[in-house]
Image (cartoon, helix red, strand yellow):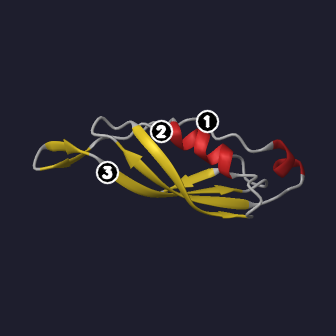
Amino acid sequence: MSTGPLIYPEIAYLSKLEGGVRARVFISETGVVDSVEIIAARPRRGIFEEAALEALRQVRYKPAEISGERVKSQKLIEVKFNPRADEPVTTD
């Protein structure tokens, strides 16, 4: 898996605002992200959603396989934003 840059929104960083975004990522047979759907976000003001969407769209996955055939897949990903950490964290 290769990841894209996750950029902490400046106003949230300066305000020391913590939060997170949970998203469903739809992955093609080639490992490219077809689409991303936001499931939940906190806080709900919309401050972290765009940063998470931009980073998740750039991720490249190893394609899922069933019986040796590449197939479409999906993952539930949580992106955490913490201004006291060195980098935002992405987990799946």
Disc 3 to disc 1, how far (Cα)? 22 Å
Q: Residue at x 47, y 38 (%)?
A: 59
Q: Secondary structure at mark 1?
A: loop
- Is residue 36 shown above or below 1? below
Q: In the image, residue 31 lies at what x, y percent? A: 34, 38
Q: In the image, residue 73 lies at what x, y percent? A: 31, 51
| Kind of residue indicated by mark 1 | Pro
Q: Residue at x 64, y 41 (%)?
A: 6
Q: Using a 10 Å C-alpha cutoff, classify the residue at mark 2 as few (fewer than 14 neighbours), some (14 to 19) or many (20 or more).
A: some
Give the residue pinned by disc 3: 73
Pick the residue in front: 30 or 14.
30
State the image quarter where residue 5 is shown.
Answer: top right
Give the residue pinned by disc 2: 59
Of mark 1 and mark 2, the one earlier in the sequence is 1
Of mark 3 and mark 2, the one earlier in the sequence is 2
Q: In the image, residue 24 lies at what x, y percent? A: 47, 56
| Kind of residue indicated by mark 2 | Val
Look at discs 3 and 2 and give the one toward the viewer: 3
Give the residue pinned by disc 1: 5
